[in-house]
Each structure stands twice: as structure tokens, then as C-alpha cells.
Image (cartoon, rainbow, N blue to C red):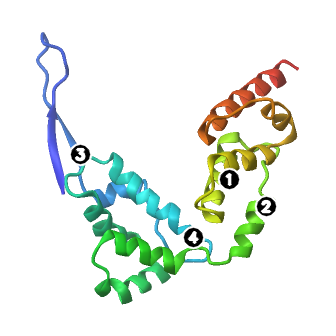
Amino acid sequence: QTTTTITQLPYSNVNTTPIHIIVNTDPLQQMKDFVKPFNGNPNDDIIKWLESIVHYFGIAQISGDKETLYFQYAPAFMKEYAYKWWANQKHYIFSWSIFKQAVITQFSEKNEYLIAQQFDQRKQQINEPVIKYYYDIIDLCKKYDSDMTDKQKIRKLTNGLKLSLYQEAIKETYSTSFDFLTKVQQLENIQKLIELRQ
């Protein structure tokens, strides 16, 4: 489904030919830029996949009930094992909340020991940007303990920093985990400036 809009150049004293712009309004086409296919493999992250669907409809200007839209379009991105699962289950699932609960139960990481090991061992790598390290740790925290407090997240984030940042980060206080990200990114930028001057 496409719509055609007519736009004229904003010059009142110039006669111009209208420019026709084709705007693609098919949500599935636009969603491909935001939502990756979910195959149902052990290393696929079901939580991130669900969040990407919610994120798309949070910014797309599409009329309708959000949860109805999530449920309507999500199965189109299920491939391989995930699609086979959906083909067998779709007759029993009638809403986004039931769908979400069912896919999390089926495809979430079930190996608690593996999650715990990843959580314990995750450290910032030498050339890893703070923002990547931060969001990886936050994702691990959700998997490891969904009720983890901000104070616990900040402690985990701080302890895993590379030494050059850790030495400065422990001098700061942080009100929230996002406050940690903001302040440590500032420290990261200062260190980059110092390195450039050496």
C-alpha cells in the first residue's frame, strides 16, 4: 500500500512543477529496518526481539491499538523453528500478552548456569565503547535477575570496567544506572582527549 503526496518547493515567486514523492506506508516493509527475523535458535534473544517490535510501533505513526498491532505483525518475522512453533500454536494464542508469555516460555534462555557464567565473566574489553559494554551488562542483568536494583547494576557495571576507567569511575557517585552511563561516557571522552595529546 502506497500513498502519493505532492510537495512544492517553498519559493512563492517561482513557478515550479510539483514533485511527487512516493511514501511506502506498508508497516511490514518499514519494520524490516527495525525488527530482525526470529529463527528460534538457542543463541537468539527473544526478549530483544520482542522489544524491537514494541520499539517500532512506539515510533511508527500507525493508527490502532498498539498490542493488537504487535500481535498482528510479529508472526511475520518468525522463521525456521520459530515459524514451525507458531504454525502449531497459533490456534491457541489470541492476544499479544498470551503470545509474549508463550514465546518467552518456549524460546528464552533456560540454562541458568550459562547465564550466571556470562554474568560473572563479562568485563569491558580494551577497545570496547562504554555504551556497548553498558547495554550488554544491562541485558545480562535482566536475564540473571529481573528484580535487580539499580544499586546492584551500578556495582556490576563499575566492577567490570577496564582499569583505566575503573580508577576514575569509583570516585563518582551515581543515582541511577543511566547516570552511570552518562558520567562514565564523559570519563571515556576525557581519556580519549588525553590520549590524543600524548
Name the foreground residue: 125 vs 161: 161
Q: Quadrant of residue 99?
A: bottom left
Looking at marks 3 and 2 on the same chain, the residue that comes earlier in the sequence is marked by 3
Q: Quadrant of residue 197?
A: top right
Q: Which residue is mark 4?
A: 44
Q: Which mark is residue 137?
A: 1
Question: Would you place residue 84 above or below residue 57 in this image?
Answer: below
Three-letter amino acid code at disc 2? Answer: Asp
Q: Residue drawn 33% across and 53% down?
A: 57
Quick one: SS at disc 3?
strand
Q: Which mark is residue 120?
A: 2
Looking at marks 4 and 1 on the same chain, the residue that comes earlier in the sequence is marked by 4
Q: Residue drawn 76% across and 43% down?
A: 158
Quick one: SS at disc 1?
helix
Q: Is residue 26 left or right of residue 55?
A: left
Q: Which residue is mark 3?
A: 23
Say which of marks 3 and 4 sits in front.
Answer: 4
Three-letter amino acid code at disc 1? Answer: Ile
Residue 61, position as x, y percentages in the image: 26, 46
Looking at marks 2 and 1 on the same chain, the residue that comes earlier in the sequence is marked by 2
Three-letter amino acid code at disc 4? Answer: Asp
Alpha-carbon distance for marks 3 and 2? 48 Å
Asked if the residues shown at circle 2 and circle 4 are in contact, with their CB atoms under 8 angstroms apart, the answer is: no
Which image quarter holds the N terminus?
bottom left
